[in-house]
Image: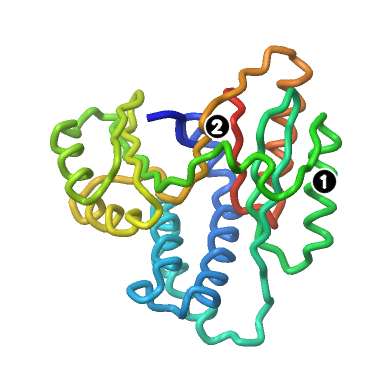
């Protein structure tokens, strides 16, 4: 299929992921809280948005106790902090398309931060929809096959039977693609079948990629992504930079 997953495009080392695990859990907990409040309560059976976040949390190895506590707290905390979801779009160096998904309790602070990152590193923040048209929204499940123990035909059959659109084999991992509406059912089916997930979430997949050649552009692009990833309000950053 056209495009590659976030996993293939900006994969970090396992050590770097482990170092940031606490921050990752905090961001997922925030996303879970919003899903409980906006999606219809703390039961994932009746709240598909929450089910999607739980799948993401489990793939990130967030402990079940943390997941349970977060849901229970959000389900009974009418007076807790109110976060809103805001998406920012813009361009990095040499026209790289960037989408930043945030959850914030202070939209002025978050907007100022995002604009600063775009401006400082050779890009510019645009209007809503300025780059998202060039991305496809897909469910993406990354399955670990580092030990080459998975039978490819069996996985493809399991995934397609569950409703997946496509399966790709990419150097030690399988990438399972689906429509957002089919994601939860496919996640449950493959999880029940015993596959190990490295990532499971709804992603924005670029339709084309830009490869930077200027060393300054590369440096600025990677620094901008690093600053965005480190911001507590940022949930996901999608882009078409081929690093």
Quarter of the rendering containing residue 111 = bottom right
Give SS at disc 1: helix
Q: Quadrant of residue 238?
A: top right
* Residue at mark 1 to residue at mark 2: CA–CA distance: 22 Å
Residue at point 51% right, 31% down?
Answer: 207
Q: Give the mark, 1 or 2, whose residue is nearer the N terminus.
A: 2
Q: How many numbered marks are there?
A: 2
Pick the quarter of the image with the C terminus. Answer: top right
Assign the N terminus to one quadrant of the image: top left
Q: Residue at x 85, y 37 (%)?
A: 119
Give the left or right position of residue 58, taking residue 154 as reference: right
Q: Position of residue 230 (x, y in %)?
A: 69, 46
How crowded is the residue under tag 2: few (<14 C-alpha within 10 Å), some, or many (20+)?
some
Q: Nearer the viewer, mark 1 or mark 2?
A: 1
Above or below, comparing residue 214 to residue 185 in the picture: above
Mark sitting on residue 115: 1
User: Which disc is residue 216 wearing?
Assistant: none
| In the image: residue 169, left or right of residue 94 | left
Q: Mark 2 — residue?
A: 10
Is residue 104 toward the left or the right of residue 60 in the image? right
User: What sort of colour scheme is used for the picture?
Assistant: rainbow
Residue at x 59%, y 41% (from the top left corner): 133
Q: Is residue 13 above or below residue 193?
A: above
Up-down: is 125 above or below 93? below
Question: Where is residue 132 shown, x and y percent of the image?
Answer: 61, 43
- In this orientation, which residue lies closer to the viewer: 207 or 218? 207
Where residue 13 appears, as percent x and y from the top left, is 51, 32
Question: Where residue 26 sits: x, y (%)?
Answer: 59, 60
Q: Residue at x 19, y 34 (%)?
A: 150
């Amino acid at each position: 299929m056209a495009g590659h997953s976030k996993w293939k495009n900006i994969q970090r080392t396992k050590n770097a992921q482990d170092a940031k695990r606490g921050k990752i859990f905090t961001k997922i907990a925030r996303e879970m809280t919003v899903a409980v409040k906006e999606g219809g309560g703390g039961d994932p059976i009746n709240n598909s948005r929450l089910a999607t976040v739980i799948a993401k949390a489990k793939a990130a190895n967030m402990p079940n106790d943390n997941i349970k506590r977060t849901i229970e707290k959000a389900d009974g905390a009418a007076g807790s902090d109110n976060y809103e979801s805001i998406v920012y779009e813009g361009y990095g160096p040499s026209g790289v398309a960037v989408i930043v998904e945030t959850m914030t309790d202070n939209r002025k602070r978050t907007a100022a931060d995002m604009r600063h990152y775009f401006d400082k590193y050779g890009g510019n923040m645009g209007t809503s929809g300025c780059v998202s048209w060039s991305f496809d929204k897909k469910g993406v499940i990354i399955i670990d096959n580092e030990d080459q123990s998975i039978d490819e035909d069996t996985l493809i059959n399991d995934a397609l039977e569950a409703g997946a659109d496509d399966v790709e084999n990419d150097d030690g991992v399988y990438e399972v693609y689906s429509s957002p509406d089919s994601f939860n059912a496919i996640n449950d089916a493959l999880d029940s079948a015993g596959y190990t997930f490295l990532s499971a979430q709804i992603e924005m997949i670029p339709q084309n990629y830009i490869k930077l050649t200027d060393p300054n552009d590369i440096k600025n692009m990677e620094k901008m992504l690093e600053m965005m990833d480190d911001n507590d309000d940022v949930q996901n950053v999608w882009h078409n930079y081929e690093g």
